[in-house]
Amino acid sequence: MGHPKHAEVRAGYRVERSGRIARIVLDGEWTTAQATPLDSALQKIDLGGAQEVQIDASGLKRLDSAGAWLLLRTKRRIEERGQKVTQLNIPQDYRPLFDTMHEEHTAPPVVIPHRHTLRHFVERLGRGFIHALQQGKEMLAYVGHVTIEIIETIGPQKQLRWPAFIHQIEETGITALPIVGLLSFLIGVVLAYQGADQLRRFGAEILTVDLVAVAVLREVGGLLTAIIVAGRSGSAFTAQIGTMKVNEEVDAMETIGLNTVDVLVLPRIVGLVVVLPLLTFYANVMGVLGGAMMSYLALGITIPEFLRELQSALTVWTFWLGIIKAPVFAFIIALVGCFEGLKVEGNAASVGKLTTRSVVESIFLVIVFDAAFSILFSILGI
Amino acid sequence: MAERRDNEEIVIRVRGLVNQLGGNVLHDHLDLDVKRGEVLGVVGGSGTGKSVLLRSIVGLNRPKAGSIKVFGEETVGKDAEDLHTLQPRWGVLFQDGALFSSQTVAENIQVPLREHADMPQSLMNEIASMKLSMVGLPEDAGHKYPSQLSGGMRKRAGLARALALDPELVFLDEPTAGLDPISAAHFDELVRGLQESLNLTVFMVTHDIDTLRATTDRIAVLVDRKIHVGTIETLVNDKHPWIHEYFTGVRGHAALASAPA
């Protein structure tokens, strides 16, 4: 005897009529595996006009809870139609199961809501909009809260947590060097190649140097670094803090009397604000190096020529305007990362959801602020 | 009963099981038989590898050595994929329910049905509702997400999912921990009732001596990397100090004193 989990139809019933009495005789294995054919067969049960119904389940070979449910459901439907069930024979072994179910199960079937209707879509849209507004308000409040805490650390009564701060610098800065360096170098190469291609038509190949230098220093270096760091560290902040929330570590800290902003948020924000300008500087150097290499290979501009042109193309401001944005980007990335992490609620799915949101939000805000800086700089005429 | 063969059929056969955790030997050539239709309670101090034993049997943990046969099929060294024929025949209740957090309780219960049985949605809804009442959850619990339930309710929902396919063998990892004593007693009754009507085999890790008394046929005690198997009556007289203290300590004594003679 195997175990007929995926077998052909092996369960059924027949109806015997004698006068006003209908007798339902069950046979076979009334189990989960047989539930689907049984279900459709029982929907079509025909008892004619019988007033009395007897159910004889004594010939059942097996009965499990799905089968017992189908039997119970049939009995209840018969009774709802006003017919009387006068006899119900169930093998002694299955009696406890059937009785427990009979006594305890009266609830209607659960309804799995349909999630793809227009109404649902509109509802989600509305909820999303209100949620976005609330999110903005909360974030603003959080910026204020964190700012106050930062100002307090400057005072004498409170101190930055140095070990955590140093650890963050290593995590977000030093370990990011390879990827930031490589990508900036490649972007420098791409810019020089594209620039050379276009400028050659005007006989102005030498201006490729200006193009690469200005683009990398003012925009690309800072933006690229910020986006990499948002993806690398912003997401890590959310995931780390979020996991701590799920494990109730954050609650434990609060009951012990630790200030979670002090312990978790400030070292990350201050660390990143220090690190990102340095990373940006490094990215600038690597980007220009990539440009120099490509200029030499594609246009034959030698390194001394490149440097001479570089000197005339750049002012001190070109450099500073790129660097000055970095602390702002860092503040945005770290703040969003920590804020979303602290919003995680008791389950693992929420960590994933908020991590994604944290990265999207911080990249979005970084680009918005970059645009704002461009407008500001053009108004100031620099 | 055609299905019910002689009582001595072995459902789980563990031979020479060795488990190591971080250089620490948890199980040292452990042998264990679980018979069809019995409720086996597994007890032991913290860190004696009760849960590891359970995880080894269902193929979640790779033992260092040994053989484990479930329904005559080897599970050691196999992945979840290879155990596809066994999975509908067993159900596992994890310690905190391990419900899928992105799905409602009703959807959770329907996951095994969807995976292993081809059923119309209406029937699955009826079955989900039935399983909910079987484990004593209110009817509106089906619409809730696991994060909206209390620990005890999550456990019941996890049990409902474990029972979704009416398995022959059920693994329960500390099923009554976190339940209030009344719910725990109801749960014990439920296990016993299901066991009797379905000839269910239950492998239960528990600390609850009331549960042991109320539900188990035999008890396996994990001590000193080995296993001692017996009934409550024989284990009470066991010479081993831990076992002795477990069954005759204050808590054990109170529970056993209330046992029917």
Image (cartoon, grey):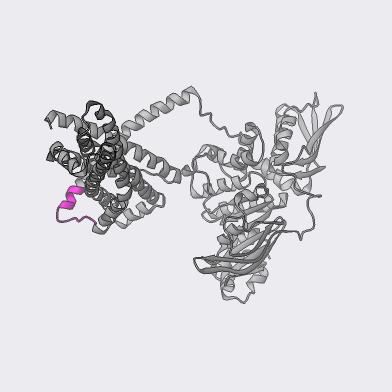
Residue A173, image x and y in percent?
A: 28, 51
Q: What stretch is highlighted in magenta?
A: A150-161
Residue A202, image x and y in percent?
A: 22, 26
Q: Residue at x 82, y 42 (%)?
A: A59
Q: Is residue A65 visible?
A: yes
Q: Is A159 included in the stretch rendered in magenta?
A: yes
Is residue B88 toward the left or the right of residue A132 in the image?
Answer: right
Q: Nearer the viewer, residue A26 or A316?
A: A316
Q: Can residue A23 be seen in this view?
A: no
Quadrant for the C terminus of chain A in the image: top left
Is residue A91 toward the left or the right of residue A214 in the image?
Answer: right
Image quadrant assignment for residue A295: top left
Q: Which of B174 and B250 is in front in this view?
A: B174
How many labels, in total?
0
Residue A246, image x and y in percent?
A: 41, 49
Residue A102, image x and y in percent?
A: 68, 41
Q: Which of B236 and A302 is in front in this view?
A: A302
Q: Is A58 included in the stretch rendered in magenta?
A: no
A136 versus A93 height, above or below: above
Is residue A197 toward the left or the right of residue A76 in the image?
Answer: left
B154 versus B253 height, above or below: above
Is residue A258 toward the left or the right of residue B211 in the image?
Answer: left
Image quadrant assignment for residue A90: top right
